[in-house]
């Protein structure tokens, strides 16, 4: 059974950077497409980015050019590098996995993904 654990969240000032990690256990990560989602208080969970098994990436418009997703299959880990953070990026960030998605991956709807981590808090405040 695949298990995902997120880390790397924290509090940064607007304009700052964080790198989130999604570490997998119980299975090899290269068998899955991985997505990052976020949920702010009182809002629906929304897709941020995803990376297919073959490394093709997809981004939501609101993070395009600021966030970069990557995967290191040797370390069984997917990363989300977040630069130029804004207060509206404040949310709990989750990684998720789906067994399909060799060449492409969706960032919505969330039901496309089968396995989820517990989330890590990201806050961007002055």
Image: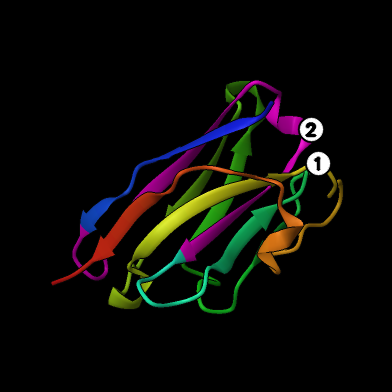
Mark nearest the camera among 2 and 1 is 1
x and y percentages locating residue 104 in the rendered image: 82, 57
103 w.r.t. 2: above or below: below
Dot 2 falls on a residue whose secondary structure is: helix
x and y percentages locating residue 121 in the rendered image: 32, 54
Badge 2, how many Cα within 10 Å: few under 14, some, many 20+?
A: some
Would residue 11 be visible to someone looking at this image? yes
Label 2 sits on residue: 31
Q: How many numbered discs sit on the rendered protein?
A: 2
x and y percentages locating residue 63 in the rendered image: 51, 71
Mark 2 or mark 1, which has the lower sequence index? Answer: 2
Q: For residue 8, what is the image quadrant?
A: top left
What residue occupies the far left of the structure in this picture? 126
Residue drawn 51% across the image and 74% down it? 44
Q: Which residues are magenta?
A: 12-38
Q: For residue 82, what is the image quadrant?
A: bottom left
Residue drawn 65% across the image and 21% down it? 26
x and y percentages locating residue 120 in the rendered image: 37, 48
Would residue 83 be visible to someone looking at this image? no
Q: Is residue 106 magenta?
A: no
Quadrant housing the C terminus: bottom left
Dot 1 falls on a residue whose secondary structure is: loop
Residue 65 relative to residue 58: left or right: left
Label 1 sits on residue: 99
62 w.r.t. 84: above or below: below
Q: Are marks 2 and 1 in contact (CB under 8 Å)?
A: yes
Q: Is residue 36 magenta?
A: yes
Residue 118 relative to residue 85: left or right: right
Badge 1, how many Cα within 10 Å: few under 14, some, many 20+?
A: some
């Amino acid at each position: 059974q695949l298990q995902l654990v997120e880390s790397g969240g924290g509090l940064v000032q607007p304009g700052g950077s964080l790198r989130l990690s999604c570490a997998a256990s119980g299975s090899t990560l290269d068998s899955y497409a991985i997505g990052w989602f976020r949920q702010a208080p009182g809002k629906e969970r929304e897709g941020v980015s995803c990376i297919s098994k073959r490394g093709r990436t997809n981004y939501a418009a609101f993070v395009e050019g600021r966030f970069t997703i990557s995967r290191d299959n040797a370390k069984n880990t997917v990363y989300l590098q977040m630069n130029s953070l804004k207060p509206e990026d404040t949310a709990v960030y989750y990684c998720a996995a789906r067994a399909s998605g060799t060449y492409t991956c969706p960032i919505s709807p969330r039901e496309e993904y089968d396995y989820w981590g517990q989330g890590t808090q990201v806050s961007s405040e002055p």
